[in-house]
Amino acid sequence: MIKELVVLNRSYRKFHNHKKVLVEQLTQLVDLARNTPSAKNQQPLKYILVTNENDVSLIESHLKWAAFLKDWNGPDKSEQPPAYIIMLIDKNLNENAYIDAGIAAQTILLGAVEKQMGGCIIRSVNRNEVLKHFNLPSNLEIVQVIAIGYPNQKIELITPDESGSVQYYQDNSGVHYVPKRKLEDVIIIPDTTSEHSG
Ligand SMILES: Cc1cc2nc3c(=O)[nH]c(=O)nc-3n(C[C@H](O)[C@H](O)[C@H](O)COP(=O)(O)O)c2cc1C
């Protein structure tokens, strides 16, 4: 069911590093993304599938994980993601494809969850270094990197407390809590009965 997949599809930041992800599996995920909506159907998104250990560690060294977890500097070696998908916009096709990119990223992650995997969208990337490493032409912009692997992390969705804070946090046993706003706080019911003043 879609609701189960959406709820299971959390931003996982700890993985079983020894459980490798195959290029073939990443290819299947990109094949899902390839079929998603695209403004004017320009389809400017391109992907680099990264499973090679050298490339994986290069990417890992240029990411920032979990801004709210101030005393956590990202996953330990044994919990790092074994694979990444680098999502790029080909600016020769469409300069402004960030909505396409969001749809594609969520589709990739839902596909991963369906395969008992999971991942995390990461926008805090040192783009220059990654572009340089892969020797990419200037028409390609890195939109985001998606970590992919087999999660080794318990994540729970919770309702924000009275303060209304939506900051995620971790308890001492490593359980990661993600506050999501209540339904009634996200649906706006406009008052169409009062008269308009102008
Ligand atoms: C556009 C976007 C950019 C993100 N960038 C990062 C990032 O740079 N580093 C990171 O650890 N998480 C990143 N995340 C993951 C968010 O922190 C995560 O979605 C949020 O904490 C809610 O958790 P959830 O995905 O489990 O609902 C990003 C998510 C989105 C949608």
Image: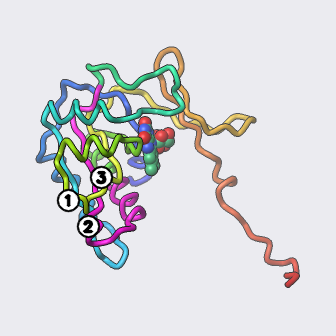
Q: Residue at x 20, y 59 (%)?
A: 31
- For the residues labelled 3 and 1, the Cα–Cα distance comes to 9 Å
Horizontal relation, residue 155 to residue 40: left or right: right
**Circle 2 SS class:** loop
Tell me if residue 83 is in the magenta stretch.
yes
Mark 2 surroundings: few (<14), some (14-19) or many (≥20) residues within 10 A:
few
Is residue 92 toward the left or the right of residue 180 in the image? left
- Count neighbours of disc 3 (C-alpha within 10 A) and say few if under 14, some if 14 to 19, many if 20 or more: many
Q: Earlier in the sequence, mark 2 or mark 3?
A: 2
Q: For residue 15: magenta?
A: no
Q: Answer whether residue 99 is visible to the viewer in this image.
A: yes
What residue type is disc 2 on?
Answer: Asn
Task: Where is residue 71? Give x, y as percent.
Answer: 50, 20
Q: Give the range drawn in magenta.
A: 80-107
Residue found farthest to the bottom: 198
Q: What element carries label 3?
A: helix
Disc ID at residue 35: 2
Inspect the image, locate mark 3, and give the three-letter code of the amino acid beneath it.
Answer: Ile
- Dot label at residue 112: none
Residue 150 position by quadrant: top left
In space, the residues marked 2 and 1 are separated at their CA atoms by 7 Å
Q: Mark 3 points at which residue?
A: 108
Mark 1 and mark 2 in contact (Cβ < 8 Å)? Answer: yes
Q: Name the residue under label 1.
A: 31
